[in-house]
Amino acid sequence: MNIRKFTLISITSLILIALLSLLSYQRYFSNKLGTETESLSNYSRIVKTDGKDIKIYKDSKWETFELKGVELNSFKPGHSRFETSTPKNEIINWLDEIGEMNANVIKIPYIQSPSFYNAIYDYNLNRENPIYVMHEIMLDEKAVLKNYDAFDKKILKNLKKDIKKTINVINGQALIMSNKRSHRGLYLKDISKYNLGFIIGTNTNPEIVTLTNEKHKEKNEYKGEYFSVKEGSAFEVFIGEVLDFSAKYEIEKYEKSSLLSFLVSAETDLFEYKHESNLTKHANINIEHILPNQGNNLFVSYRYHPSSLDFLEYEYSELEKTLENDGSVAKKHLERLTNFYKSPVVISDTGISSSRAKSKVDQSDGFDRGGFSEKEQGERIVDLLEKIDSSGAAGTIVSSWQDDWTRLTSFSLVEDYLDLNNSSYWHDLQSSDESFGFLKFESGEKDNQVYLDGKFSDWKETETILAEDKINLKVKSDLSHLYLLVEKENWSLTEELLYIGLDITPLSGSTKWEDEAEFTTNADFVIKLQGYNESRIVVNERYNLFNYLYKYYANIIEKESDIPDKESDKFDAIYLLNRKKFYLKDSDQVLFPIYYETGKLTYGIDNPTNEEFNSKADFNKEGDKVEIKIPWSLLNVKDPLQRKAYGDFYKDGVDSQQKLEKLGFSINYKENGKNSVTKESFYTIEKTKTIDYFERLKDSYYIVKEYWDENPE
């Protein structure tokens, strides 16, 4: 035997031995999970639907199972979306906390790293009350954006590949070498005995539904082995084919059957809304047109964020809202939803954000998208859960377990005030969608965290950058906030006025704020400290991003044709847009945009160990000292990690940026008719070497935990 042949045989033998060892390893651990299953002719199952209920097979019988879940992924600061390497023991700690809050399901938004599934396996091993899994599968976003046709070969092919990968991962038989839509690795732990089902198409937008139906009007029926479609639309035929493929693959390869669903929302559901656009009006998906041929494994998964769609606010008449619904649009809509479907309805994506700013406003129920304290977040979630539970839904999955710094707030012309390349490295409290979690990652070091609590011990090692005429200023920062400590002798916040001029960019700014204040620095922003309820931050009109976006660049608020002067001494309140103009079709009426002043400062204590803790607090005063914290994006900082701020967007557009290495400060204070102005001082922003953070459970965690404990079924 020659050497080449011997080498080839040896390598082949080693590969076969390795594969057999891996299969034995996988089967050994699979058999250790002691979950009961019901065995049918060609598959086994632990879950099924029964009318509008979901049932679990337990103690040799079927029990009604109400889903109480949270979305969980492996995100931690400092890693890109598909490169997170959260250790198994940390995932287990999260699962422990999720179990302790009386949740029974986690929803996984896309394929995570192998350690994530290993943690689920180890957590559930021999546990009396396991945490079950619901796994989502997304469409290929790039392929969708290129061709809004669900039957496009690339979209359908990639979706089927992702379905196979996800089912293989759940069954512990997957090797993913390269994938732009998920993590990679070797998956050997079989958690299928705790898998409830798969939710497909979680990023489906109304455009692809409408255009698919338009392009394929002839497609209205589908006959598969496990699912069929009769008298449906083209997109419903697509769903039927995809669900049939999923059931067939899982049953034929693994002899198991899980629940299946395709996500719908108010934008893509079957209801016709009075004031929706033509785009969403024709994007109708009726899950009732999808028919299981055998087994009862189809359920309705529904995304419901009350404040996300303007047309829902005006859908129901006052009589409809008040009739046994307490004037609630949410309650009316949820009851309408669950009353229509014969299958179980799971509200699989809902939640409330504890961000400082809010991106949308809910005028009916108060479920704004952001702008809540952590306590208010918990109270609003419970209010939402009560409405969902009373509607007859089969369960709720709240998004999400942890704050996710990679999420974008997509309700403005600039989708988010951050650099996407570094979005996972810093927390933007002005971006509502980054703060939906029960678990918060606090920026900075735990032992060196600045709290607005009047104790000031966290400022001992900080250098004073300004000491002049009975006034001192200290400045420090992390990747979320800029912190200021201002000290002035015999300071009365209600009787005196103090202005802090802040220079961000050399491209604009003024040493005067009209006749109100003056500085020795060219201020782009002014912090006005005037009492406990009227203090605020204002911006120079040349650096006012809101006016540029909604008055100059786009005529949404009003038309602004003239470019403000670079040396303008006019300063404006800082606003955020909550709704563009909205057209009421039934009355032929145009409603004006809604926006609010996000630059207004909230007084309070932000130390979570204090009984008066308010996570929305922006400043606090104790004696002669005032502590202030300002989110970076409120100061037009695009990326504190790379030290980048907006440049002159009137000249170079919204993509303009400039290096930000130092900030200029000057203080103007007025007392007893005396007007004093300090010299200019500077704070140098240190280059970030490590991404420091620590974990903290929010108040909302304990509030929802108590609700689920008091409402076990």
Image (spheres, helix red, strand yellow):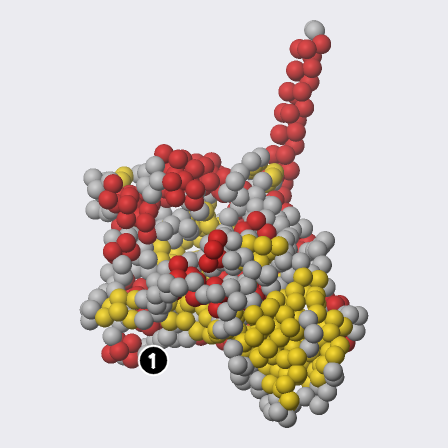
Name the secondary structure under disc 1: loop
Look at label 1 and name its amino acid: Asp
Residue 711 at x, y = what percent? 49, 73
Report the residue at 66% width, 83% height from top. 676
- The answer to whether residue 478 is above or below residue 110 is below
Report the residue at 26% width, 69% height from top. 590
Q: On the image, which quarter does residue 303 sit in?
A: bottom left
Instruction: Read off the residue under disc 1.
Output: 326
Report the residue at 65% width, 65% height from top. 663
Asked whether, in this view, residue 576 is left or right of residue 87, the answer is left
Residue at the extreme top of the image, as rendered: 1
Residue 334 at x, y = what percent? 34, 67
Residue 636 at x, y = what percent? 55, 63
Quadrant where the image shows the N terminus:
top right
How many marks do you count on the picture? 1
**Residue 322 seen in the figure:** yes
Label 1 crowd bin: few (<14), some (14–19), many (20+), radius 10 Å: few
Asked whether, in this view, residue 299 is left or right of residue 566, the answer is left
